[in-house]
Image: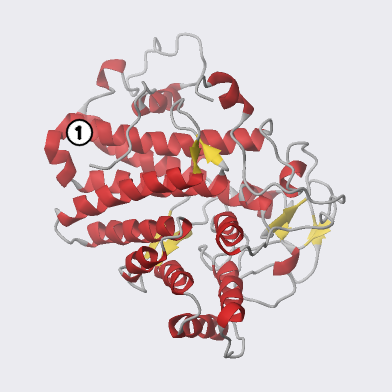
Amino acid sequence: MKFFKSKTKQIPLLALMLLFITAGGCDGILDVDDPGSIEEDQLRSPENEELIVNGVRGQFQYTFSYSSLWAQMLTDELKMEHTFADYRPIASREVDETNVITENLFNFWTKSVRHAQDAVEYLEEFHGEEAWELHNMQKVLTYGGHSLIHYAEVFCEGTLDVSEAYTTDELFGMAVDMFDDALDVADRLDASDEVMEFRHLANLGMARAKLNLGEMDQAAQYAAEVPEDFESWLRYSDENAREYNQLYGGATESRFISPGSDFLGEDDIRVPHSDERVGNLVTGTDIYQVFSPMNYENWEEPIQQSTDVRFANGLEARYIRAEAEGPSEYTLDLVNERRDFAGQDEVDYSGDELMAELRYQKARDFFMTGTRLGDIRRYKNLYDVDYFPTGEVPLYGGNYGNVTCFPIPQSEINANPNL
């Protein structure tokens, strides 16, 4: 198997879950008489297999939502105003390794990857070689691959389990290996609806990783394997904070985020926001309130804690194929289809003009779905096309810096002897 495995000792996934489940206080945490808790000697039990697999999905789901808010704030997609000191450097592209959001994003994405790694090891321990013929293995590998993609798109470089720093290309390569293993597992399974959903999800992830690596022929090939009607949802809940859609706080509860300047005033149904300015509930500044975009449940309504998100679909695969193919007839057809969807006139673009329109349409179709930072980093790195905001920072004032990705946080630099 090509799956990347850590060479260092990790904190077991279920041990982390145990702390989360039972942590009402710190003293004597393992001595509490709680008949509903998980005992230490039960942690590696096959009885906990579904808990392990659900934990992988749960960590990815939480981190995806958090990252869709905070990582994308570095782009032109959103703007904000808040009194918390660590928020402004993100909004102004001046974030550094000491920022609390940098720390959180790093911890959450590396934990998401580690949960998938741990789950693979647990399944192997429980089932031996037969683990590689299980749908649960297919699921954790697929979520692990998508976690690696987001980690690579958000961070300038990254570590895993006290490793040396990996480049973004190396992280994308690890994602490719996990998707490759997930697809191998899928080949051994009956083609049930759920197995096919994760096959499509792995093919989509593979296409996205290959696109970021500049391997265009393979990106187009994997993207073409994803059906146009494919979709995969993340399900949020107002039951507890770990299950909230994190966009709720900024968009609805406190209203401190707003669509970026380039996304306002276009009368585009894919970027719904209030017709008039409303009060920012943190600072009192009048801003445009953002509503649920196209890939959110309850499109055009206020985002709630329980608002679900369609985080992957066949349309993304079509955009990947179009970008990989370049200014082709396929690309023009997709552009005009999306323009028609948004109530815009047909165009007959070609060359660079067509590719610019493709990028424009994708930004609206995938507004607030965690793709923008990775996209504009790729545009800059591969095509020398720069969409990062410049000039005066909206709401805050002052000028933008030049940060295009999040650095490894200071805590990791201090604790990791390999850096």
Residue 4 visible to an observer of this rendering: yes
Can you say which quadrant of the picture contains the N terminus? Answer: top left
Tag 1: amino acid = Glu
State the SS at label 1.
Answer: helix
Can you say which quadrant of the picture contains the C terminus? Answer: top right
Residue drawn at the location 57% of the way across and 39% of the way down: 105
Q: Few, some or many C-alpha atoms within 10 Å of disc 1 (few <14, some 14-19, many ≥20)? A: some
Q: Is residue 210 above or below residue 170?
A: below
Left/right of residue 380 with respect to residue 328 in the rendered view = right
Query: Residue 149's x, y, as percent?
Result: 45, 49
Left/right of residue 407 with respect to residue 23 in the rendered view = right
- Quarter occupied by residue 98: top right
Query: Residue 366's x, y, as percent?
Result: 54, 65
Residue drawn at the location 48% of the way across and 75% of the way down: 326
Residue behind mark 1: 124
Residue drawn at the location 22% of the way across and 26% of the way down: 45
Q: Is residue 67 above or below residue 297?
A: above
Most foreground residue, 26 or 202: 202
- Colour convention of the picture: secondary structure
Residue 240 visible to an observer of this rendering: no
Residue drawn at the location 58% of the way across and 71% of the way down: 359
Query: Residue 317's x, y, as percent?
Result: 41, 68
Left/right of residue 176 with respect to residue 86 in the rendered view = left
Q: How many marks?
A: 1
- Quarter occupied by residue 15: top left
